[in-house]
Image (cartoon, helix red, strand yellow):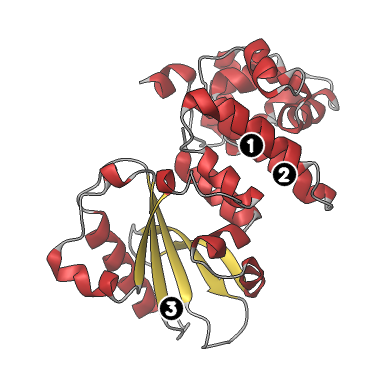
Amino acid sequence: MKTDSILYRLFKTFPGVFFELLGQPPVEAEAYEFLLVEVKQTNFRIDGAFLPKQLDLKRPIHFTEFQCQPDPELYSRLLTEIFMYLDKTEIRNDWRGTVIWMSRRLDPGVPMRYWEFFESQRVQIIYLDELRDFTNQSIGLGTLTLVVEPLEQASVKARSLIDRSRQVPDEQVRRKLAELIETIIVYKFPHKSQAEIQAMLELGDLKQTRVYQEGLEDGERKGRVEGKLEAVPRLLKLGLILEQVAEALELEIAEVTEAARRYNLPQASQTEQQK
């Protein structure tokens, strides 16, 4: 599963979830913009940062890092990236950091020389799998923890979240929530067929989901293969793999692969995901 891209998409679309993780009111997100942050003249890139929208020194910059596999250099690298960014940015706000691990077992531990940052809570550590059992989760937190939900329970939780999403008054938010939940399930069950996903989520044919429909509409509207190929980048950026895009647009995998190469996009296949 491309966990980084899913969490980035979640925080980008529903930034209030991040502040819920910190124990702050979700409305705090209205004062921030969530962006990928690159350090100028380096190859460093931080997974995401919440930057204050207005000049307000009372609000800190929030740097985030997502981690789904062991990485003994994570803390050293993150702090290096943060300080390099702070050195080059014109923003003078204070800062905070949040490291989000899929599981505590992946965390190699904070090196002693960095303890002060963590003991002072300037940098916090969150383990997603330890949030699963919290009662009365918001729908945003529920969607976030669906990423680490055990497979045998994931479909039940996904159906519950989709049911709850139908109660969201804002149609656009409701639609995006449902799409994100569907995307997580597709990635958690890469071996499942469309019929099996349909039965699991009780949503009808997967081709009826917005992710597929918009890709189909983009191509069918132009009525030719080239028109469909122009829809490939959009679906890949949403997180679908080559086989899913090919099936949705009724193209050969080789055609989709060539289109992805043309647009310089990642070309993850189902075989690669199974490794």
Which of discs 1 and 3 lies nearer the camera? The answer is 1
Seen from the viewer's position, the closer of residues 232 and 65 is 65
State which tag comes first along the sequence, 3 or 2: 3
Q: Which residue occupies 64% across, 39% down?
A: 180
Seen from the viewer's position, the closer of residues 23 and 214 is 23
State which tag comes first along the sequence, 1 or 3: 3
| Residue located beneath label 1 in the image | 181
Q: Amino acid at mark 3?
A: Thr
Q: Which residue occupies 55% across, 70% down?
A: 24
> CA–CA distance between discs 1 and 3?
35 Å
Q: Secondary structure at mark 2?
A: helix
| Residue located beneath label 3 in the image | 89
Q: Secondary structure at mark 1?
A: helix
Among the 4 quarters of the image, the one containing residue 75: bottom left
Q: Quadrant of the C terminus?
A: top left
Among the 4 quarters of the image, the one containing residue 106: top left
Mark 3 surroundings: few (<14), some (14-19) or many (≥20) residues within 10 A: few
